[in-house]
Amino acid sequence: MKLGFLGCGKMATALVGGVLKTGVFPAESIRVYDCVPAASEALGQKTGVTAVANAGALAEEVDALVLCVKPADALDALRGLDGKLGGKLVISIVAGLSIAALEKAAGSSTRVVRVMPNTPALVGQGAAAFAIGSTANRNDADLVSKILSAVGCAAEVKESLLDAVTGLSGSGPAYIYLVIEALADGGVLMGLPRDLALKLAAQTVAGSAAMVLQTGQHPAALRDQVTSPGGTTIAGMEQLEEAAVRAALMNAVRAATERSRELGA
């Protein structure tokens, strides 16, 4: 089976690297193309995959095509491959484009899976969700899961939930970067050197996330383990609750979800 990537940006580069590293696909089974020839050639030289001359050749050679172009270009890119995607699988990581729109542009015999990834996939720590189209099958879902799991974790959901996924994990890294920045600023305020404060803040967030994932315990239970009566942590927690940090984060997910729905309408 051959896997193709239409578009060779950062997310495509992360996915190619992930499937190669985990052995999901060997380099000789991967084809890539970008409208900027230097991009596909650079990815080919870096990873050993094959860069092809044009999008048509890419579609003809592969069994599954990962669509990694800008939203404004995606539907035209699929329409331009009319007749070359019949019976094949298109995996779209393009934000805001519905399965129905993708299926219409790709052709009725093309199977479609829509994916919402996030940028930590670039360091192998992505959190993605995907929804399968009307003609996609379980083998397609399994393949997409393997590709996404090569750069993090993946979950299958109904398409109606992808906007919520966008609001949570798609936009979520930005929320966490803000948290890391704020924690580091607090450390600087209290006298820590900037570089040390940032390192401690980032590692604290990473370590706390790992505790949730590895122990399976609820975050509230883990929080209680470090919140001693009358201690330092409860004093800090009081300030977070007074500032409504919990509500602010919940509202951020809600607002991003609603915006995603508006963009996809």
Image (spheres, rainbow, N blue to C red):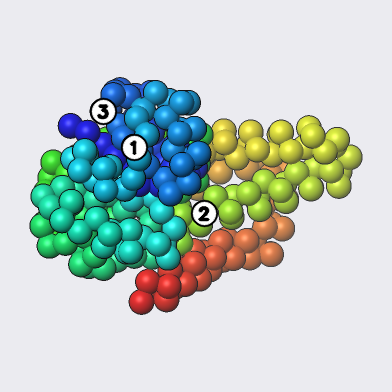
Secondary structure found at label 2 = helix
Q: For the residues marked 2 and 1, what is the alpha-carbon distance in whole angstroms?
A: 35 Å
Secondary structure found at label 3 = helix
> Which image quarter: residue 147?
top left
Say the numbered circle drawn on residue 29: 3
- Of residue 101 and residue 121, the one placed in the foreground of this image is 101
Image position, residue 15 (x, y; %): 39, 37
Image vertical order of residue 244 relative to residue 213, above or below: below
Q: Is residue 252 left or right of residue 65?
A: right
Give the residue at x 28% y 24%. 28
- The residue positioned farthest toward the right in the image shown: 191
Q: Earlier in the sequence, mark 3 or mark 2?
A: 3
* Mark in front: 3 vs 2: 3
Query: Which residue, given by chain and number where applicable, does mark 2 sit on?
Result: 172
Image position, residue 231 (x, y; %): 72, 42
The three-letter amino acid code for the residue at tag 1 is: Val
Q: Earlier in the sequence, mark 2 or mark 1?
A: 1
Neighbours of disc 3 within 10 Å: few (<14), some (14-19), many (20+):
some
Q: For the residues marked 3 and 2, what is the alpha-carbon distance in whole angstroms?
A: 33 Å
Image vertical order of residue 2 relative to residue 102, above or below: above
Query: Which residue, given by chain and number where applicable, does mark 1 sit on?
Result: 52
Q: Is residue 216 left or right of residue 219?
A: left
Image vertical order of residue 27 relative to residue 201, above or below: above
Secondary structure found at label 1 = loop
Image position, residue 50 (x, y; %): 34, 30
Visible in this render: residue 90? yes
- Of residue 77 and residue 89, the one placed in the foreground of this image is 77
The three-letter amino acid code for the residue at tag 2 is: Gly
> Which image quarter: residue 138?
top left
Q: Quadrant of the image for the C terminus?
A: bottom left
